[in-house]
Amino acid sequence: MRMKFLWERKQLIGRITLAIAIVLCGGIGILRLHSGTVNAIAEVDRVNGTLAELSHYVADGHAWIRGRATALGSLDAEALQRFDKGVERRVAQFRSLKTNLAQQTITYFWAEPLRENTDDHLVEEERRAYLTAATETVATAADDRPMRLRMFDLHAQKLIQTIEAMRDSADTARERGIVAVDGIVKASSGFSVLLLAFVAWHPVFGRTRVKPAQPALR
């Protein structure tokens, strides 16, 4: 009886030790996965914030430039250059944030909309087209200027719409990231339930069957 008791106790200790090891390893892995995903979502929020700032900057800058071109019939080259530098600086900030996010392997699946649909080169193309339209608007004769101003507005709207489309992609990536976090939490809960069941019912080392003693041959 004593041997049987010691064997069962050793078996129980083995199950508990293995369970603790699994909990520690699994917990560390899940914690890193969860925290990494949450941090990546925060990066997406920063990307979205940068794009929002860029969109407002373009809208406000265009209103000022258009008002000056309409009222004075001229455009300050230095002011237009400041506007261009402001857009360029914000685009560079967005590009840096996007690059940092793309280097995180944890975002490979759920951040795909942000990687695929946020091409900063499109913003660069629209920015150059907008600056060209601004210059052409000022150089246009007074009689033709209303038509040119409408074209100028269209270029501004196209630039803003390009930026807003990128924001939509960032929002989609954020939603998918939140779904990923929920999936990690649910998977962690399922893992815990299975582990408890393992500890409670599944023997780790197995049971040895004691064979009945056979009578000695005479």
Image (tube, rainbow, N blue to C red):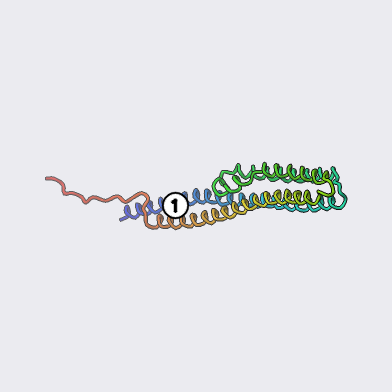
In-front residue for pair 209/74: 74
Q: Which residue is drawn at 84% across and 52% down?
A: 70
In-front residue for pair 125/85: 125
The count of marks equals 1
Secondary element type, mark 1: helix
In-front residue for pair 218/158: 158
Q: Where is residue 75 in the image (x, y as percent from the top left)?
A: 85, 46
Residue to which mark 1 is pinned: 19
Q: Residue at x 63, y 46 (%)?
A: 118
- What's under tag 1, amino acid-wise? Ala
Q: Where is residue 214 in the image (x, y as percent from the top left)?
A: 18, 49
Judged from this view, the residue extending furthest toward the front is: 143
Q: Which residue is drawn at 65% across and 49% down?
A: 166
| Viewport quadrant of the N terminus | bottom left
| Viewport quadrant of the C terminus | top left
Judged from this view, the residue extending furthest toward the left is: 218
Q: In this view, does 82 lie to the left or right of 184?
A: right
Q: Where is residue 152 in the image (x, y as percent from the top left)?
A: 76, 49
Q: Is residue 11 left or right of residue 213?
A: right
Q: Which residue is drawn at 20% across and 50% down?
A: 213
Q: Where is residue 33 in the image (x, y as percent from the top left)?
A: 55, 49
